[in-house]
Amino acid sequence: MAYISFLASVLEQSSPIMLAALAAMITLRANILNVAVEGMMLVGAFTAIAVGNASGSAALALLCALVAAIVMSQLLALMTLRFSADFIVAGLGINLLAAGGSLFALEWFYRSPGGLRPITFPDLWHIPAGALSWLPVLGPALEGQSIIVVLSFLAVPACFVFLYKTPTGYYLRASGEDEHAARSAGIDVARMKALALAISGLLAGLAGAQISMDKLHFFLPEMTSGRGFIGLAATLFSGGLPWTTAAAAVLFGFFGALGDRLQALDIPSQFVLMLPYLAAILGLTFARWRLHIRNRPARILKPQATSEPSGSHRADLEPS
């Protein structure tokens, strides 16, 4: 059915955005605005295709993609936590390094700056057809989805449990909310921030691998197409909470899938391609407006002027 196909497209489009949003959300709870999610995703996407092409193993390609993204996250941690670089400036540097480094690797190792397109590539595990026929609506939409799509939705409750039900999650959130109080309580703030960046790299690497390994089986420069920044927008839109972050990611994924469907109609392609980014801009605008309303001071009511006493009463009040 058409709506089942559309729902499956929404799930597929939402998966990398949700992983990117969770990656940004984890670091945001440690008081880090991680703009390097885009670069980590790009490194994960390239590493997945390069290792899968060389080894013929999808599992090894996925593992190496995660490791490469985590290495990039720790490079960001080294620059910011050890050498006190600004997080936003260092994050943009990571993005530039990922974009330039992938182009250099394509030219140096593969003599193909336009991309890496293996002739054969190992497939990820996908949910078999008919395996979830007992689950109405959602089951048929999940059939045929890759293991990374499944992991992306399982990552939402996993992040919630980690942040709110484990001591390490408490320490991480405390490090982000008040560093001085956390240090006074004996928490290693730098280690908590480095851990948040490592988890962010893990999720971003998974997102990058999903983009390049799931259906495409090739790598193109800048193939992440701003999904890391859309995930960051979803995090800011939702206030950095796991469940609302996931809902915002699904919303942006919905607009992405809607754009794909609108391409079949007589609608300018430029309008279709801008839908996910337009949704991100509107989401950030709404989040800023909501924050402004929430932080607006209460209106101070002026006391009403009391009426002047009548003449007879005024005479009584005057001293004799």
Image (cartoon, rainbow, N blue to C red):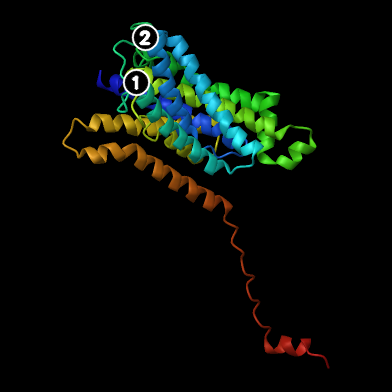
Q: Foreground: 184 or 315? A: 184
Q: Is residue 185 left or right of residue 90?
A: right
Q: Is residue 178 left or right of residue 110?
A: right
> Exactly how many numbered labels are in the figure?
2
Q: Position of residue 275 (x, y in %)?
A: 31, 38
Q: Foreground: 134 or 105? A: 105
Q: Mark number for residue 193?
A: none
User: Of helix, strand and loop, which one carries label 2?
Assistant: loop
Task: Classify the position of the C terminus by image quarter.
Answer: bottom right
Q: Amino acid at mark 1?
A: Tyr
Can residue 156 be seen in the rendering of this structure? no
Q: Quadrant of residue 111?
A: top left
Between discs 2 and 1, the one toward the N terminus = 1
Q: Position of residue 196 (x, y in %)?
A: 61, 30
Label 1, on which residue? 110
Label 2, on which residue? 122
Q: Are marks 2 and 1 in contact (CB under 8 Å)?
A: no
Task: Classify the position of the N terminus by image quarter.
Answer: top left
Q: Residues within 10 Å of mark 1 (few under 14, many from 20)?
A: few
Q: Quadrant of residue 84?
A: top right
Q: Which residue is most to the bottom?
A: 320
Q: Position of residue 262 (x, y in %)?
A: 23, 33
Q: Amino acid at mark 2?
A: Pro
Q: Position of residue 235 (x, y in %)?
A: 50, 36
Can residue 220 be seen in the rendering of this structure? yes
